[in-house]
Image (cartoon, rainbow, N blue to C red):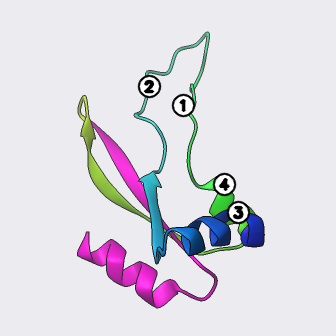
Amino acid sequence: MRDEGLDAVMDEHHLDVLVAPTTGPATSRTFVHGDRSTGGSTSPAAVAGYPSITVPASFVQGLPVGLSFFGRAWSEDRLIALAYAF
């Protein structure tokens, strides 16, 4: 996940961080379906052991949506600065 995953993409495109919606918009919970997940973007950074930070980004139909910033190993200072600037 590191060398051939996140690092490869970041090297190829000369990136400091990757930014993606944390998950899809929230959905209604029902007794039949429970909580329905629409997927998320946090797994690759977690599997690689890389830092990530999630910040509130907006609202979709009155429900909050987060934006996640993912950095390379030991890049917490840059990651926090960019998330704060957002």
User: On the image, numbered disc 2 is attached to which residue?
Assistant: 27
| Residue 21 lies in the magenta stretch | no
Residue at point 45%, 36% (across, down): 24
Mark 3: secondary structure: helix
| C-alpha distance separating marks 3 and 4 | 12 Å
Label 2–label 1 contact, CB within 8 A = yes
Residue at point 64%, 74% (across, down): 50
Q: In which quadrant is the C terminus drawn?
A: bottom left
Mark 4: secondary structure: helix
Query: The disc labelled 4 sits on which kind of residue?
Result: Ser
| C-alpha distance separating marks 2 and 3 | 30 Å
Q: Nearer the viewer, mark 2 or mark 4?
A: 4
User: On the image, numbered disc 4 is attached to which residue?
Assistant: 43
Q: In this view, does 65 lie above or below 86?
A: above
Question: Which residues are the magenta region?
Answer: 63-86
User: On the image, numbered disc 1 is attached to which residue?
Assistant: 38
Sequence order check, earlier mark of 4 and 1: 1
Q: Is residue 23 left or right of residue 36?
A: left
Q: Nearer the viewer, mark 3 or mark 4?
A: 3
Q: In this view, does 61 lie above or below 42?
A: above
Residue 3, given in percent of the width and then of the height, sits at 75, 72
| C-alpha distance separating marks 2 and 1 | 8 Å
Mark 2: secondary structure: loop
Residues packed near mark 2 inside 10 Å, few (<14), some (14 to 19) or many (20 plus): few
Query: The disc labelled 3 sits on which kind of residue?
Result: Gly
